[in-house]
Each structure stands twice: as structure tokens, then as C-alpha cells.
Image (spheres, rainbow, N blue to C red):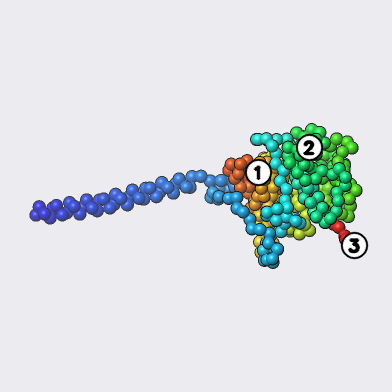
Amino acid sequence: MSMNIKTTIQDFMKQFAKVYYCAVLFLISLYQLLLTGCEHDEYFGEKQPEVEIGQEKPEENKTDNSASMEHHVFAKGVTVEHGWHDVDKLKRPQDVMACWLITASNMLQWWQDRYIEEGCKLPEGTPNGKGIGPYRSAIFDDAITKFVNLNNGGNITNGLLWYVEGKNADITGHAYPVPNTGGYLKKIQGRQLEYGERFFLSYDDWGKMTTEKEALRVFSESLIKRLKTGAAIGVDIKTHVGVGGMLHAITLWGAEVNNENEVTSVYITDSDDYEHQLVRCPIEACNNEIYNSKEIAMKIPAGKAYDKGATWAIMRLFYLSPPKLTHS
């Protein structure tokens, strides 16, 4: 009888231990689940699961693969590895308010590269190449000394119009050039040099669309069409989707396109990231419920300047076409 009692007690203890062990495992699993679910991004006004956006190295812009070319389109002479320009500001957290002038400088140096590649010679005295100034850009090192009230900010058009034609865009409240400066490319302006004195695409074009799908289509069609002409693109952005955010300017060199002819990512350089790099940024259309409009947003990966990454709203796009030359 005593043996039966002892056996019963041992069996009870084993069953109790098993139940206790399972309960502990369940509590640990539940605790881990709660921990991973407590952090989230508030993206486009809705709660979204956290998504890691790494600094993915995009594929090389291959010329021997027609399928690859259908899904990647770059400015003329630009690949992932070379052909693009990225002037960066010098000081943190903020340098002069000249991102717009840096974007124009990037685009102009790219144009001059293509012009020289065609065997042409720039007008005498035209800034070109890295130069010897602190920003390692002959164009920007010159331009930054020729504008007054830089802290008022400006517009990409200001920089292009001044450098090419020597004119003042005359935008109220913005930085303006010293009279009788610029105009370096005036002699070759016209049929050989084409650029937009105002934006060719803006939030007004896609914001009024009924759905996000339609907004993305409008944005994609215009951007792809311009990139296929070989143009470099300057972009005005807002550093926040929805209400608020500061204005900023970046340079866009190419895009990834899916089978529905929609832009899924863009390749940019940014003067505020303090790194010489081409950055791949996923694109998404979203709804701005406050203004009942659609926005095109780009996701900026985490880096030296953006610890947690960022989400920017695209506002306006400007273009500079490659040289249009005819050879006899």
C-alpha cells in the first residue's frame, strides 16, 4: 500500500512539473510577443508594423539585359556606380540654406560632363570639376559666393537660371544673385541646352486624383518620360508626410519601374546626409485625409544624418536635359 501511495505522489509531481514548465514557456512566449509588438511607426497617419529599410545596394544599370533596362531608367551617363554628383554640406546639424543651389550645381556639373564627353569645350571661365574650394565642387564653390541672403533659402530654378543665363529668378523673399554674375552657359544656351525654368510636375498634378493608384500613375508617367530623355531631375520635397515639415531640395538620378510602369523606388543624392552616396528610396502614394488629397512619399533609409530614417513628401520636379548636339 505504501508503494502505491509513493508511486501516486511521484506521478502527481511529474504531471505538476510538466504543467508548470508549459505554463512558463507560454508566459515567456507571450512576453516576447508583447515586446516586439510595442514599437511601431506612425506612417501616413495609420499604425503600421515596423519595417526595416536598409541601405540596399541597387543593381548596376546593365546595358546588355533588356529586361533589366525596362525596370531601371537613369539620366544619361549615370549608373549606380558613377555619373552622378553629390555635393554635401560641411557642418552639422545644419549648414547654409543652400540645398536648392547644391541641387542645381549637381545637375549642372552632370550636364557639363556630358558636354565635354561629346568633345565640346566649355566657354572660358566656366567653373568645372572638383575645384579647390571647401565643397569640392567648382560650380557650387563659385555659386555660394555669388548669392545674397542665402539663409532665406531659394528655389532650384534660381540656381539654374542664374548659372545658365545670368538672370535673377526674382522670387520674393528668397536669396538672389549679385548683379552681373553667372551666365556661364549663355553662349551655348538654346537648342543645345534645355531646362525647365519652372517645375514640370508637382503635387497639384497627382494630389487631385481620386485614388492612390491614380496618383502614382500620374507621377510615374511624367517622371519616367523625362528620365527616358536622359534628363537629370531636381526635386523639392517636404520633410514630413501630411501637415508640417520643412522644405528641402535633392537631386534625382534614376528610378526603378515595375511591370505596370509604376515607379517603385528612386535614386537620389542629398546634401544633408553628409555622405557621398547614391541612395535608393522606396516610393509610395498615400492619402492626406486632412486636405483630402493624395501625396507621393519617399522613404529615406537610416544613416548618419537620419538615425531612424525619414518619410518625405515630393512637392515639385525640375529637369535639365542632356546636351542636344548634332555632329557633321
Q: What's the residue type where badge 2 is placed?
A: Ile
Q: Are marks 2 and 1 in contact (CB under 8 Å)?
A: no
Mark nearest the camera among 3 and 2 is 3
The residue that appears at 87% across and 38% down in the rendered structure is: 181
* Label 1 Cα crowd, 10 Å radius (few <14 / some 14-19 / many 20+): some
Residue marked by disc 2: 144
Between the residue at mark 2 and the residue at mark 1, the CA separation in whole angstroms equals 20 Å
Q: What's the residue type where badge 1 is placed?
A: Glu
Whichever of callouts 3 and 2 sits on the residue coming sooner in the sequence is 2
Residue marked by disc 3: 328
Give the position of the C terminus as an image quadrant. Answer: bottom right
Q: Position of residue 248 (x, y in %)?
A: 71, 42
Q: Secondary structure at mark 3?
A: loop
Between the residue at mark 1 and the residue at mark 3, the CA separation in whole angstroms equals 42 Å
Kindly tell me whether residue 286 is visible in this rendering: no
Q: Secondary structure at mark 2?
A: loop
Whether residue 111 is situated above or below residue 70 in the rendered picture: above
Q: Secondary structure at mark 1?
A: loop
Kindly tell me whether residue 272 is visible in this rendering: yes
Left or right: where 91 falls relative to 52: right
Q: Position of residue 169 (x, y in %)?
A: 84, 41
